Amino acid sequence: MPEETQMMKTMMPVQERGALKRILAGLCVLLVGVIVLYYGNLYVNHIITRLRGREFGPMLFGSAFSVLVHGSQVLLLLLGWILIGKGAGYYFSQAETIVSVVLSCTGIGLSWIAFPFFYPGLEYTFPLELYILVPLVALFELLTLFVENGVDRGAAMLLWVYSFQSLELLPVFPTNRQALSSLFENMYHSNEEVAVASMAGTALFLSFMAGAVTSTWLLARYSVRLSQVRRLWQYAHRRKSDREEGLAEVNMVDMRSLVHDLRNPLAAIKGMALLLQGEETESEKAEVMLRATNYMERMINEILYEDRHNSVAVEKFFDNLEKHIRPFPWGEYVTLTLSPDVRPVKIMINEIRFIRALLNILDNAWRANRTAGTKNIDACVRLNAQFVEIEILDNGPGYVPHAPLFQKSRWGSTGLGLAFTRKVVIAHNGNLLLSHRTDGVNGASVLISIPVADA
């Protein structure tokens, strides 16, 4: 396995790789295998007993049915233990392959011996002995070592099992020794017929086996290539998300440096306003300048210091937010509604960062609306006990739960804006909840709750 593929494989958590799911799936397959083993043996013995003394056609049908049932029994046993071994191997990163192969081979051998010990009707029928079967399973495991898709492994195992199971039809290789041997005695009337049938069966077996090995080799190569492409894509996607996040941090640092540099000209403007305040003809203009410079100073402090919060009335804050909303192309489609009881309530916030957080949510809502051909965005502010709730509703395709944080949405959003908003809300001791709309309208709901100032 290439070094970068191995590196990405070890980076993935055991839970994410589905270790427990594989073990449980293997146990379920084994349970089904035991049921098929018990009832399959009953039906095979019943059919073969009834076909004794019949013509060649019915007996050949009975033999083919026997091969089909016995092959399915062996296949379920092998697949069950291979799944269990694969899942258990995920918990041993340094010896994953060894644990997987040893556990699967050991389990197959124990099941092969233990099932008939507890009940004679649970006996497996396979043309090869157990000491040959176990190395074949180990060889199969090594050939399909990097094939992660369970369906691909099952298809390859199907070819292997029935290639060997076809030996059951050879008169010189009767595995179900009591039932099938009596059938072969009636099917062939001379040693020459037995020899011809054996040669034909052997040639057929060799062709089946060659096809199985070749198919497994090609399947393994295809799966490895596909796995590498998938992992490289995931790795590149994560790198891109980290790069975008890093660029956002760099931009924030640059912005803070710029904002810090703005303090010098702002101090000069404020000093000039204080000088003009003493002159009667310019006092009114000076007051306007001072209010503007004081507001800009507060903005600069809130940008530079994330943990600096100021007490502000809800009504005043959302009046300011509305002024920021209207210049956007989607500003005219936002309906901002405040309940009467929430207007005088005060909240402790970093006003600049909180406005930016809400603008991110509103912009996402607009993008979601565009994919559905809708426009309206509802922003409702209400008081709930000691919390101010801000609910933003869109009319887009709705919320997809359990999506990765940085996975691109259907409208091109990377999720970075939502991540920033969640960070800001948590910094304000609040909560952010995403869900489907509960009013019967298709769309998403973003509910932000922050405590009131005196709480």
Image: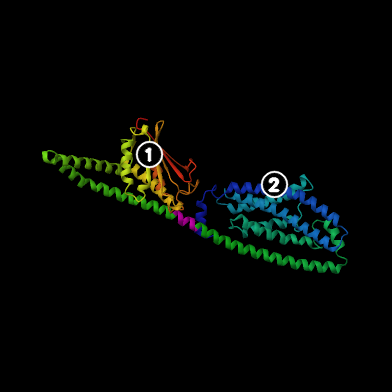
Amino acid beneath label 1: Thr
Q: Which of marks 1 and 2 precedes in the sequence?
A: 2
Q: Position of residue 128 (x, y in %)?
A: 75, 58
Who's the residue at 58% across and 52% down the image?
A: 96
Amino acid beneath label 2: Leu
387 to 107, vertically: above or below: above
Q: Give the Cα distance between marks 2 and 1.
A: 59 Å
Q: Is residue 280 magenta?
A: no
Who's the residue at 85% across and 59% down the image?
A: 183
Which quadrant is the N terminus positioned in?
bottom right
Q: Is residue 161 visible?
A: yes
405 to 347, vertically: above or below: below
Q: Residues within 10 Å of mark 1 (few under 14, many from 20)?
A: some
Tell me the mark number nearer the camera, choosing from 2 and 1.
1
Q: Which residues are magenta?
A: 232-238
Per the image, label 1 sits on a secondary structure element best described as strand
- In the picture of the structure, the residue carrying the numbered disc 2 is 31
- In the picture of the structure, the residue carrying the numbered disc 1 is 337
